[in-house]
Amino acid sequence: MTTIFHRLRVSQTLTVLMLALLTSGCEAEAPLAGHRLQILAEGLDHPWALAFLPDSGILVTERSGRLLRIDPDDGQRQAIGGVPAVAARGQGGLLDIALHPEFRRTRWVYLSYATATDSGLTTAVGRGRLEGARLAEFEELFRAQPPAEADQHFGSRLLFDRAGHLLVTVGDRRRRDWAQRLDTHAGKVLRLTADGGIPPDNPFVGQTGALPEIYSYGHRNPQGLALHPETGRVWLHEHGPRGGDEINLVVAGANYGWPLVTFGREYHGPTIGVEPPQPGFVSPLHHWTPSIAPSGLAFYSGEGFPEWRGDLFVGALVHRHLQRLRLRGGEVIAQEKLLTDQGWRIRDVRVGPDGYLYLLTDAADGVLARLEPGPDQSRP
């Protein structure tokens, strides 16, 4: 139901200090200067991901299993039918969403979700054609093997690369050793064709004892994927345990170390593996220790915020902020914490076609918000 809040389109104006100078290793914590935070929709049930439709509508997944189309102009929402049954347990449910690269022609919408089997829960990916208010012809394209009893670490981010392949992340399913094994999909980045097939140049195709969908391995629970706007390379971030959240460049066939090589520690204190760098393992470009619990990842290349062009944005679930990372080449040279006064667990961050930043908050009363340029109304 549309609320008075939606109809009035309440806008919140946040005041901020901008960084005058960013230098290597520095970190600032401040709200923003001269920017507006618009609440586009509220009352969402643990929203997980969003995708922009060509007609300006926004598709939003809710972990409980509902897919919504939200009008960013008035907050009106419409439930989309044809969504598969999901296992909304723990961290599982309806998770990421991606549109086919030629969506205007194909109308394919891709979903990742937790699904139940006789042997436990697992991550699945499927697609359906968006026809009006329904996903028609929905079909499951992939199901990670093997299932596990745990209701955590599903991974589940989706991303189409520039070649039109679909990248899928799967968490370690709380079975650490699986991340290093090539006979399981857990703890991996997978690479599929748009119809769920296996690209012939995947790094482990034809290797005995290895699943051919695997593209990289040794990951814990990756929940951020983004294409660099200039290089087209795939960037990923993943949750560490107590420390050791990582940003990595995804390389075919590479081993990212979990749980053998990590900056993270057990939640009760002891070390887990050895710290990077270690021979045979890819070291992260950046890590957060202590953990911020990153979710959602986006490069900014729009026109709305010229001062942010080329920066990387990450949602933080535990430390409850939006993090801006200033890059120089492949190096993080500065960090800035934004929206710290909101207290939001930011689940997803995306750059819209209008050049503004869109956010989802992980809560039973979650919001869809837009950060846009605007006058700093707090000044006289």
Image (cartoon, rainbow, N blue to C red):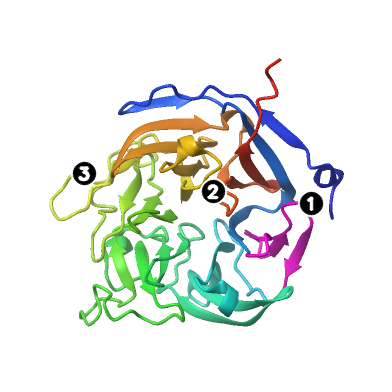
Residue count near mark 1 (Cα–Cα under 10 Å), binned few <14, some 14–19, many ≥20: some
Looking at marks 1 and 2 on the same chain, the residue that comes earlier in the sequence is marked by 1
Tell me the residue at 73%/75% (across/down). Answer: 132
User: Tag 2's secondary structure?
Assistant: strand
For the N terminus, the image quarter is bottom right
Instruction: Find residue 276 and name its label.
Output: 3
**In the image shown, does 217 or 183 lie closer to the viewer?**
217
Circles 1 and 2, Cβ within 8 Å, touching? The answer is no
Measure how far apart labels 2 and 3 are at the Cα level. Answer: 28 Å
Quadrant hosting residue 375 = top right
Magenta residues, start to end: 54-81
Answer whether residue 36 is magenta in the image.
no
Tell me the residue at 47%/60% (across/down). Answer: 157
Instruction: Find residue 349 and name its label.
Output: 2
Circles 2 and 3, Cβ within 8 Å, touching? The answer is no
**63 is higher (above) or lower (below) than 341:** below
**50 is higher (above) or lower (below) than 141:** above
Residue count near mark 2 (Cα–Cα under 10 Å), binned few <14, some 14–19, many ≥20: many
Amino acid type at circle 2 is Val
Residue pointed to by mark 1: 74
Amino acid type at circle 3 is Pro
- Left or right: 122 as drawn, with respect to 373: left
Tell me the residue at 28%/43% (across/down). Answer: 329
User: Tag 3's secondary structure?
Assistant: loop
Q: Position of residue 218 (x, y in %)?
A: 29, 58
Quadrant hosting residue 198 = bottom left
Tell me the residue at 39%/66% (across/down). Answer: 161
Measure how far apart labels 1 and 2 are at the Cα level. Answer: 20 Å
Q: Position of residue 182 (x, y in %)?
A: 27, 70
